[in-house]
Image: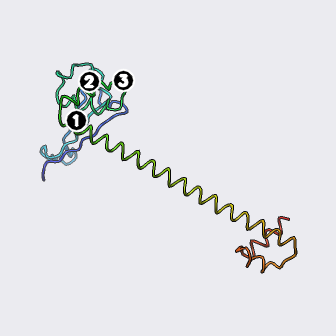
């Protein structure tokens, strides 16, 4: 088995009671006393524990701390200066910032297209509902004129049962 890693960013509430924001857990089957001998890891990064680290000068942060602060505060307007300094300090983070910007643009475009699609579907639905209302109104007018139900159905596109139900409404 090759080494494998799962990295989980925990953002809602601390999971571990300590002050450490990174935990490296290795799989172990306690019941059968079987270990994967360090070949599989879950790395948790608790972004809720970064307040103290975010106060450190960027030059004193470890690369892992820079990445964590970048992920935690990248959309925080109050921390924009800090995030920009981190981006300037490390090329990999700068590249990640560019990817995040493009993802944000893609999400914005997807949301815009979804909105346009919903608008078109709503408009089409209104047209269909208006057409059906007009067909029913015409059918009711024909019923008042004592035109046979079969002719009304053929002329409006309604079923004979639909026309008959309109008669009951009158």
Q: For mark 3, what is the residue?
A: 78
Q: Which mark is residue 66?
A: none
Q: What separation in Å lies between label 1 and label 3 (alpha carbons)? A: 19 Å
Between 132 and 28, the residue placed more toward the observer is: 132
| Mark before the other along the chain sequence, 1 or 3 | 3
List x then y, in percent, for residue 27: 20, 44
**Residue at left offset 64%, top offset 61%:** 127
Q: Which residue is mark 1?
A: 94
Give whichever of 104, 65 is nearer the camera. 104
10 Å crowding of disc 3: few (<14), some (14-19), many (20+): few
Q: Quadrant of residue 24?
A: top left
Question: Which quadrant holds residue 158?
Answer: bottom right
Q: Quadrant of the C terminus?
A: bottom right
Mark 2 or 1: the one toward you: 1
Q: Quadrant of residue 28?
A: top left
Residue depicted at x 32% and y 24%: 79
Could you tell me how far apart the alpha carbons at marks 3 and 2 are, in whole angstroms?
A: 24 Å
Q: Is 44 above or below relative to 123?
A: above
Q: Considering only order in the chain, which callout, 2 or 3, is on the residue closer to the N terminus?
A: 2
Residue placed most toward the observer, 67 or 77: 77
Residue in the image at 78% along x and 70% along y = 139
Badge 1 density bin: few <14, some 14–19, many ≥20, Cα 10 Å: some
Eyeballing the image, is 36 above or below 137? above
Residue 103 in picture, x, y percent from top left: 33, 44
Looking at the rendered structure, the secondary structure element under dot 2 is loop
From the viewer's perspective, tell me whether residue 158 is left or right of residue 40.
Answer: right
Disc 2 and disc 1 in contact, CB within 8 angstroms: no
Q: Name the spot of residue 95 as percent of width and height, x first.
A: 22, 39
Q: Are marks 1 and 3 in contact (CB under 8 Å)?
A: no
Residue ID for mark 2: 19
């Amino acid at each position: 088995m090759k080494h494998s890693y799962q990295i989980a960013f925990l953002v809602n509430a601390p999971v571990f009671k300590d002050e450490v924001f990174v935990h490296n857990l290795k799989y172990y089957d306690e019941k059968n006393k079987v270990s994967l001998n360090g070949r599989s890891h879950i790395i948790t990064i608790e972004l809720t524990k970064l307040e103290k680290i975010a106060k450190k000068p960027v030059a004193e942060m470890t690369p892992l701390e820079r990445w964590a602060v970048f992920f935690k505060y990248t959309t925080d307007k109050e921390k924009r200066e800090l995030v920009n300094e981190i981006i300037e300090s490390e090329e990999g983070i700068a590249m990640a910032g560019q990817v995040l910007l493009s993802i944000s643009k893609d999400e914005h475009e997807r949301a815009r297209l979804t909105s346009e699609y919903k608008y078109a579907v709503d408009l089409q639905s209104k047209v269909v509902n208006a057409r059906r209302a007009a067909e029913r109104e015409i059918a009711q007018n024909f019923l008042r004129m004592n035109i046979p139900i079969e002719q009304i159905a053929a002329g409006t596109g309604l079923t004979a049962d639909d026309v008959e139900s309109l008669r009951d409404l009158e």
